[in-house]
Image (tube, grey):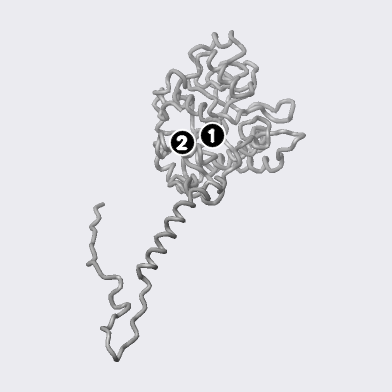
Amino acid sequence: MSHVLHQRPLQNPFSNSFPFSPPSSSNPKRPISLFTPTTLLTLLLLLIIIGTLCPYYAGLIPQNTIFSSFSKPSLSSSKWAHYTLDQALSFAAKNGSVIVCIVSQPYLPFLNNWLISVARHKREGMVLVIAEDYASLEKVNQRWPGHAVLIPPVLDAEDAHKFGSKGFFNFTARRPSHLLKILELGYNVMYNDVDMVWLADPFAKLEGNHDVYFTDDMTAIKPLNHSHDLPPPGKKGRPYICSCMIFLRPTDGAKLVLKKWLEELQLQPWSRAKKSNDQPAFNWALMKTAKEVDLYLLPQAAFPTGGLYFKNKTWVKETKGKHVIIHNNYIVGFEKKIKRFRDYGLWLADDHAEESPLGRL
């Protein structure tokens, strides 16, 4: 956009302010001027003194005072802070479907690793990253504009990466709320944890037109032609379905499951005695709505839990070529997860960063 500069005619700043009358006997009093040589000299000396002392006093002001906030604008003032979920879905979704993950800053290396595997199957354009802090929002959108959104309020992410912590519970407990918002906007959504790697395109395994698709978290080996119904309850009175990989259609049934999931989280809050996460509540929700909702258990050979894939070499050989998504669970700690991925040739972020839309982080 061009700008035209208009130059105003130069004016004497003193014109008509202090009209000078020629001296006469009828007007013996001369007007008083504030800009005498003495006054101007005094002002000049004052400016020199102030200019000399200011650096000294500035050094005495702590860096965390209000003045320092002006030099570092808050990330919340970024344009991405006003980017809405509706706008983000309109941008990222393809054919009414979106792939969603949820991250805070400590998970960014896993996000990049997962994205590389997704990109290898030409699905990265469908990905929407739900950032749980402004640092993640800015980092992703700086490298990959439009593919990250933050849904307020922002949590204190200091603890969010520690499994079993209250921060981790609060982080994961927002998942059903985020997914429900997406369904209410009319989109199909595939949710993935970012400690996963795609070996094939999972959309090919979404047979039929069911409300909710999910994976079993049990390590017991199932027959290849196992039932796709919700498994029976285990020792704790509920199934052991993983909340790590879910596909939902925007149906009343899928919305019912998410609403029940939120209710169960309210009934089972985190405590020091019972360091819970969102997965038990998800299982209770599935079990309590199973008669009203069309549920579908995805094939174990395609979506094995980490406790099976990384610990049963015989089974892995017998099912070779059938694996679709590998989940690096049944292990705690970032470094341990990265090492195990490396040991199995699944840590892609070091040698294949150029394949990620984020590049090398």
Residue at image location 46% in from the left, 51% down from the top: 52
Say left or right for 4 vs 228: left
Name the spot of residue 21 as percent of width and height, x first.
Answer: 27, 83
Image disc number at residue 284: none
Mark 2 crowd level (few <14, some 14–19, many ≥20, 10 Å Cα): some
Residue 246 to residue 8: above or below = above
Question: Residue at the right extreme?
Answer: 273
The residue where tag 2 is placed is: 139
Name the spot of residue 306 as percent of width and height, x first.
Answer: 59, 19
The residue where tag 1 is placed is: 105
Say left or right for 332 vs 24: right
Can residue 290 be seen here? The reply is no
Residue 12, image quadrant: bottom left
Say left or right for 46 vs 104: left
Residue 327, image quadrant: top right
Name the spot of residue 148 as percent of width and height, x first.
Answer: 46, 38
Question: Residue at the bottom extreme?
Answer: 26
Q: Are marks 1 and 2 in contact (CB under 8 Å)?
A: yes
Residue 164 to residue 220: above or below = below
Residue 266 to residue 338: above or below = below
Of 337 and 30, which appears nearest the observer?
A: 30
Residue at image location 23% in from the left, 57% down from the top: 4
